[in-house]
Image (cartoon, helix red, strand yellow):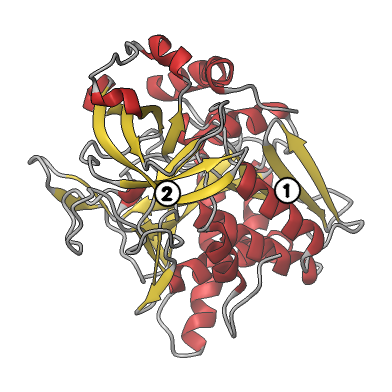
Amino acid sequence: MPHSQVDEPLEVTLLREFSQQGTTSFHETRVREIIKTWVQEGPSGTGESVELSELKGNLVFTYTGRPSNDLPAVAFAAHMDHPGFLVLEPSRYAEFGVETPQSGDPRKEYVLAKVMGGMSKDIVGARLDFYDKGKGYFTDCGTIREVVLGKNERPDLVWIEKRLTTRLSTDRNGVIANFNFSPFPKSPNPFEIVDGVIKAPILDDLAGCAAIMAAFSKIVEAHLEVNVYAVFHWGEELGFLGAHQVAMSGILPKDTFVYSVDTSSHVKPGKDPGSVVSTGIELGKGAVIRSGDRISPNYSWQALQLLRSAGENLDGLRQMHGRSEATQDAYANAGSCEATAYLIHGYRAAAIALPLRYWHNNVVGEPTEADPRGACREEIAVSDLQDARSLMYQTAVAIPGSNRLRELEPAWRRETYNLSPLQQELKTEGPRDVLRLSAQFGVRES
């Protein structure tokens, strides 16, 4: 179990532990094991009221506070992966259209890796950590020397020069790499809190995982009379793969209010190359009640009404103590999140977002300290992380006690949602992507 710093909020302690783990799509094992261990051994326990279901790499924890099931349940979902690099066996180079380097080619001493998720193409010179499932974690073990672009001019493959002292397992299947931002060789990735801002190598979406775990613990300890699901997905960065699986499995009742808890960039690309514009959300101004995203401009109005009701309660509590509001309400369209996956599969879904700086470790268009490596740590505000945890708790409280929910009761099963062509395409192609990518990168175990 993670050990808390003195007076440190639980969600920060959990995030601190996560920040030292390697993760990317299909290789979320280290994060998954921390979550399982903590929920089973931590304050929430796994007594009669909490059950764990494992669904092909996804984790679904169920708290049954209302056995009668006469009110809708609520589910909070986050993903355990982050863009990273999957080291390829030389025998697989041809599969990705790359010829094996011959003698005299400096790349013969390099390793080729598949980029797992979206990131900037300006990452030549970035330093990496390898995680080798056979040998453990090495620090400062590689440097990106070449980027191979794929569709839409996005990074598809990278050539990595590993240190002479680095010895990977003969079987490279399962060796991954993440960015390393330590100022000193052979030292851990730094997790820092500076002026109320968390700086860590991976916050998207380990921050969402930590916030859900802290909220879930509080909900269970308070014995709230509501059924709550804490859901942790794999494979979000390659197309909501785990979310498709859970949404189609039927493990969540169809009248469940589902909330994606994710980060969202506070800026997005502008019209001019290298420029950025605001997405309307700010670090330190509270958790975001996200009304839509790039694929789904409008989330479920019922899910948003319930979330806003909880936000009003939370804002009121904050103001009673002379503090600023704890939430922002915005259509954050820098990208999309897993609320869309649940929405297209028939759930009433919306999202809670944490404003994020340096999305996917991308420094393009944003001021930062001089860093020749083309990547930097992600940043979120501690207060936003705490507000997200509190907003989830207030949402669970609102289920059995909200006048707003009673007003919605006649329409619980009547809300209709017409899918756009883009949403319909995702509903059709998403499940196919699960099968295709699982066959290519490793079938998820049941």
Quarter of the rendering containing residue 396: bottom right
**Mark 2, other Cα within 10 Å: few <14 / some 14–19 / many ≥20:** many
Please provide percent x and percent y for residue 196. 39, 77
Give, as a three-letter code, the residue at label 1: Pro
* 290 left or right of 397 in image: left
The one of 221 and 293 positioned closer to us in this rendering: 221
User: Between 322 and 164, which is closer to the camera in this rendering?
Assistant: 164
Point 78% across, 49% down: residue: 62
Residue positioned 45% across, 30% down in the render: 87
User: Horizontal placement of 144 versus 128: left or right?
Assistant: left
Q: Earlier in the sequence, mark 2 or mark 1?
A: 1
Tag 1, which secondary structure? loop
Q: Nearest the camera: 271 or 154? A: 154
Residue reaching furthest to the right: 48
Q: How many marks?
A: 2
Q: Which residue is mark 2?
A: 291
Q: Which label number is shown at residue 11?
A: none
Left or right placement of residue 336 versus residue 433 in this view: left
Using the numbered discs, state the Cα–Cα distance from disc 2 to disc 1 in whole angstroms: 20 Å
Position of the C terminus by quadrant: top right
Q: Quadrant of residue 109?
A: top left
Residue of label 1: 72
The quarter in which the N terminus is drawn is: bottom right
Q: Amino acid at mark 2?
A: Ser
Q: Residue 186: give x, y in percent of width and height.
A: 42, 59
Q: Position of residue 418 (x, y in %)?
A: 48, 26
Whether residue 310 is visible to the viewer of this picture, yes or no, is no
